Image (cartoon, rainbow, N blue to C red):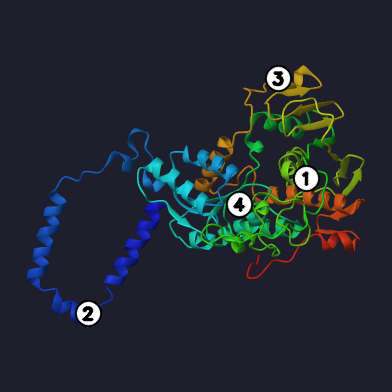
Amino acid sequence: MQYQNALKAKTAHGLASTSHSPALESRAFSRRRFLRATLQAGAILALPQIVPGAVLGKNGAVAPSERIVLGAIGIGNRGSYVLGCFLEEPDVQFVAIADVKAGRRKAVKDRADAKYGNQDCQTYRDLRELLARQDIDAVLIATGPNWHGLASMLSANAGKDVYCEKPCTKNIVESLALAQTFRRTGRVFQAGTQRRSLPNFAFAVDLAQRGKLGRLHTLHAHPGGLDPKTSGWAEPQTVPDKDDVDWDLYLGPAAYRPFNKGFLDGFNFEKGGGLTGGGCLEWGSHCVDLCQWANSADHTAPVEYEPKGKELHAVYANGVRLVLRNDGWIGLGSCPVRFEGDKGWIETGDDGEIAASSPALLTGKGAKVSGYPANFHVRDFLDCVKTRAHTRADADAACWAHIACHAANISLFLNRQVKYDPVKNEFIGDEAANRLRSEALREPWRI
């Protein structure tokens, strides 16, 4: 990557240097100059060439030609953790941070400079300046949800591969645009749904997909939020200096609202220009995603959604039921899922333990990994950047898992059943629900 960019630059320079007229070249380049240049070249070639071992990849170092040059956009608490996972990988060279908050820009730069022992990490307030850099191969996007989808698409259009934290989109139309953009550009995308790379969840999904539970009939997901209320408008406060916090850029494509510090770090569910998809998107973009995977539904979504008491029930076209519920779990940690078939069931969560209807189902489950580390997921992304393969949570998988969550939110918001056509990507005979599939973007932002 770095080597390829350097080679392009040298080639361009060489072409530029031969643009003089032949007559001038003939007069300027005399026989004496030719002999002198030849002798100097011979002397240089005769000198011993000392190349640092790190350049050749010796002693465990990664040669520059094999390094992935990384930039980051919007690095707060979660982004700081994921960036740490990237910095642990020897084939990553982190070079730039774009953030609307000056304090965050400085913190990330200080961290990178301390790691590399230099002052090379560049800072930008506007993500577009970072994306204009030709030396950057990939970006980590960990802004607020308002920016995730649009920043990912802008990055793909700029030729960057993308690791994007979740939730990745704010609405159904943005979900579809995300998938289409990455198909069109051929860039690599990894949604930050890192549980797809954790062994206990992968083991449970494998049992479901291979028919070890029998005919799959019900999937259970922990949604986190099932109360889609709008957040309203907070009391206006004095707008900070633009260099400290660029409020206009922070809002980006969202509808304008007066500055309030409480809006800087989290928003409730809002339809029509809001700053987040809210509702069941937070945990849902993990847990529903795992249920989609178990049902081999990475290219579709449920076709019916209906609130039922404290739960949301959905049904796929193949008859499998998806139940979003917060209560009644065995107690295996956060982000639990449960898959049920006519021959057995399996349940797991973030503590890494797996429960099943039969001990035989747990044969070969492997070592326990507790918590929800992102290291495996980051490594999968980096490997796919090099091989150009699809990641475990590519743009299509992210698109349809998010559509399932958005449709569930719309059903909850309207407090009634809705029916969705995943071929036409619209709600069937439901004008009110269809109006909530998308939202206007504030100027000058476009998908």
Residue type for callout 1: Cys
Q: Residue at x 73, y 57 (%)?
A: 234
> Badge 4 is on which residue?
143
For mark 2, does the 10 Å Cα neighbourhood hold few (<14), some (14 to 19), or many (20 or more) residues?
Answer: few
Q: Earlier in the sequence, mark 3 or mark 1?
A: 1
Quick one: SS at disc 1? loop
Q: CA distance from mark 1 to mark 4?
A: 19 Å
Residue 328 appearing in the image: yes
Mark 2 vs mark 4: in front: 4
Mark 2 vs mark 3: in front: 3
Residue type for callout 3: Thr
Quick one: SS at disc 4? loop
Q: Residue farthest to the top?
A: 359
Mark 3 vs mark 4: in front: 4
Look at the image and tell me in which quarter the C terminus lies. Answer: bottom right
Q: Is 392 drawn above or below residue 348 in the view shown?
A: below
Q: Earlier in the sequence, mark 2 or mark 3?
A: 2
Where residue 113 appears, as percent x and y from the top left, is 40, 45
Q: CA distance from mark 2 to mark 4?
A: 55 Å
Mark 1 vs mark 2: in front: 1
> Badge 1 is on which residue?
280
Where residue 176 appears, as percent x and y from the top left, is 72, 58
Q: Earlier in the sequence, mark 1 or mark 2?
A: 2
Q: CA distance from mark 3 to mark 4?
A: 41 Å
Asked if labels 1 and 3 touch by Cβ distance under 8 angstroms, the answer is: no
